[in-house]
Image: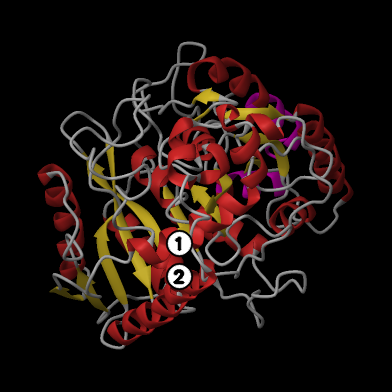
Amino acid sequence: MSFAYHTALDLTRRIAAKEISPVELVEDVIERQTALEPEINAFVTCTPDIARAAAKQAEESVMAGDALGLLHGLPLSVKDLISMEGVPWTFGSKPFAGNMGTVDAPAVARARAAGACIIGKSTTSEFGCKGTGDSPLTGVTRNPWNLAKTPGGSSAGAGASVAAGLTPFALGTDGGGSIRIPSSLCGLFGIKAQFSRVPLFPIPATPTLAHVGPLARTVRDAALLLTAISGHDARDPFAVAGPVPDYLGACGQSIEGMRIAWSPTFGYAHSDPEILEITQRAAQSFEQLGCHVQLVEAPFGDEPLDIWMAEFYGGVGTKLKGVLTESPEQLDPAVVDLLSGALDHSIEDYFIKVFERYAFRETVREFFESYDLLLSPVLPVAAFDTGLNVPPGWEDRNPVSWVYYTYPFNTTGQPAASIPAGFTESGLPVGLQMVGRINSEIDIFRAAAAFEAAYPWADKTPPLSVGGASGADN
């Protein structure tokens, strides 16, 4: 029996009812992973022994009648920008091919404590520096909807593996859109919660921008995983204190009367007309769901690209300074180009951007005094060919700046998600971005769940075949 494309919530129910063995489930996932990996290349390190040991323990707990965790017996993958103790932690970078994690990151430790069975470390572009899914260390990761296309990045393997039905969800990171980009291109729901709602440790290269969060096939599955990994941790100086919001409960709340802004370009972005048509139709559908939708052309003024780049590439450039100086040929040439001038700025230049960032955050906060959600495209295009750093026609942008819509909300830290909005004529997924007010993930979950109920997408699966069949056997 194949468990591909079953939801996490369905699997937890059936595991608790002893209808499914966690050991049987994990063996099925490992078999599918082995079969699909040559096609999609979603993993830098597979961890079958870790997954099997966790599954055995999960099964013993079920049979003993023990209390079960939120993720009990569920298969999960972890992006290779996140540390796992005793497992390679390579950042998608050749100079770090032998690096090992010395501690479980909080999200990993909490997922394990909740009963998850981790099947491997998923691929990433080098240090998360590109919005596409390749690196010099791991090569090209491919999109299950069309193997000639990129799944996006930098959480490339996370997006590809969930879209391929290997796991119901995955842990990714997002420093400029790296959860939302592959979610959009792979037909998934992915969310970065409020900054440091999921604490960060060890401290990443971009500590004031990075988020850890779920990519999932359904809104409620993402809510389940985010619940398990959220909460304060004293090792993260920015960690959000206080109770974890009830994400799952929010999925059943009414959205009647929500105030929603729809912005097709933010006043500066250039998008494919088909993308705009699909996302605008999705945004306008919220009127039929009882919301008030208003067109806003330029919600926060000029593009904040320089603010974001100063912080992101300054951090990564500092981490990679030795390699950039001594052996840049080991790095992705596109990443070298991005980082080449990152450390040339003075302290004064840097703090000018810091203060501009605070001013931008306040501008966005004031905008949200009038709205509960801001909707936009996630990306200006659908998935494009592998081997490219930017989409055809966007050559004037760099390997991250072509994702106009996502990185602004890493500078503000507020919650933002990608939700499947439809498909192009060629059958490629398109994502709608939902941005919430500060500390208001609840609004995203209730709106996303309402949209999913009205326009379900989880029954649609990529044209992959394992053993002659795709999708789930019920």
Q: Quick one: label 1, few (<14), some, or many (20+) residues within 10 Å?
A: some
Residue 48, given in percent of the width and then of the height, sits at 75, 28
For the residues labelled 1 and 2, the Cα–Cα distance comes to 9 Å
Which is nearer the eye, 134 or 434?
134
Which is nearer the eye, 254 or 204?
204
Tag 2 secondary structure: helix
> Is 438 placed above or below 37 here?
below
> Is 54 placed above or below 401 here?
above
- Dominant secondary structure (helix, strand or loop) of the stretch shown in magenta: helix
Residue 403, given in percent of the width and then of the height, sits at 32, 50
Q: Amino acid at mark 2?
A: Asp
> Is 408 placed above or below 80 here?
below
Pointer 1 with pointer 2, Cβ within 8 A: yes
Q: Could one spot residue 472 in this view of the protein? A: yes
State the mark number for residue 310: 1
Q: Quick one: label 2, few (<14), some, or many (20+) residues within 10 Å?
A: few
Q: Amino acid at mark 1?
A: Ala
Answer with left or right where residue 339 lies relative to residue 99: left
Residue wearing tag 2: 349
Determine the residue positioned at 36% across, 58% down. Answer: 406
Which is nearer the eye, 47 or 304?
304
Answer with left or right where residue 62 lies relative to residue 152: right
Which is nearer the eye, 453 or 416?
416
Determine the residue positioned at 15% across, 63% down. Answer: 284
**Tag in front: 1 or 2:** 2
Q: Could one spot residue 18 in this view of the protein? A: no
> Is 70 placed above or below 230 here?
above
Tag 1 secondary structure: helix
